[in-house]
Image: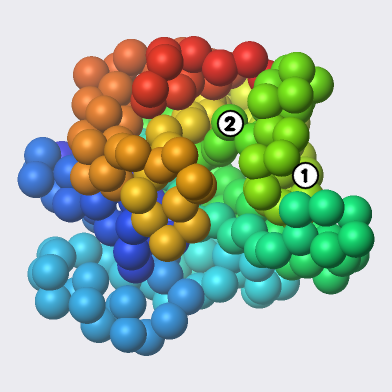
Amino acid sequence: MRNVLITGAGKGLGRELARAFFDQGWQLFLVVRNEASQTELAEEFTTANILLSDVAKPDHELKLSAWLGDATLDVVINNAGAGSKGATLGEASAEQITSAFETNCIGVFATVKGAHKALLKSPSGMVVNISSRRGSLTMQANGAAKNSGCSYSYRISKAAQNMLTLCLADDLEDDGIRVAAIHPGRLLTDMASKDAHMTAQKSAQLISQLIINNKIKNKDYLCMETGTLAW
């Protein structure tokens, strides 16, 4: 049996990823930040290990490491994400950017640090960071995000997450751990963009099959709509 850790597993894409891997017989390690989600997941996935932790909090890394103990993780999916209002300079604030950065970048860093020992136990460990087209500097430079309504905080924090992905990919390659980013598509979720059209279930199926069939390489930046993205 293979093991997968998923953050932000309480709803949306995270919940659908849990279902996709559960249906394939994987052991689930799920991270959520509220008790209601913890209870719901325990009822749906009776064999899952579930941790109540906020990835943006200073104690997350140590809490996760202690919870995992001597467990082995084959895959870590950093799905927990945050965004806020503030699509223009006048609307955006430093507080919004800080809050999103703590979840989308620092939270990913802390999760990988906390799970590193467990990933090393796997013969083919992998980290998958759920990114966004809005984190692509190339797309931003080409004007693709102009007048999109997407917040400064989301774009900046996802771009930072992409750099973190590449840093981790370089650092963990010698450990035999691959690190990649995935844009899940324009999803019909609570954080949906104006042009959203793909269900979280469909995206989760595509992502899980790429992982299960070992189709993801180190430093990949894959889009579930077009195949690849430019960093």
List the residue tagged with mark 1.
Answer: 156
Residue tagged by mark 2?
A: 133
Q: Nearer the viewer, residue 142 or 134?
A: 142
Badges 1 and 2: C-beta atoms under 8 Å apart?
no
Evaluate whether residue 170 shows in this view: no
The amino acid type found where label 1 is placed reads Ile
Residue displayed at 10% across by 39% down: 24
Helix, strand or loop at disc 2?
A: helix
Q: Is residue 186 left or right of residue 215?
A: right
| Outermost bottom residue | 35
Residue 61 position in % (x across, y down): 62, 63
Residue 87 placement (x, y as % from top left):
75, 53
Q: Nearer the N terminus, badge 1 or badge 2?
A: 2
Q: In the figure, residue 195 lies in which quadrant? A: top left
Q: Position of residue 69 (x, y in %)?
A: 43, 62
Q: Which residue is pictured at 41% across the width and 42% down the height?
A: 196
Circle 1 SS class: helix
Please report the residue visible at 38 percent of the width from the left and 55 percent of the height from the top.
Answer: 189
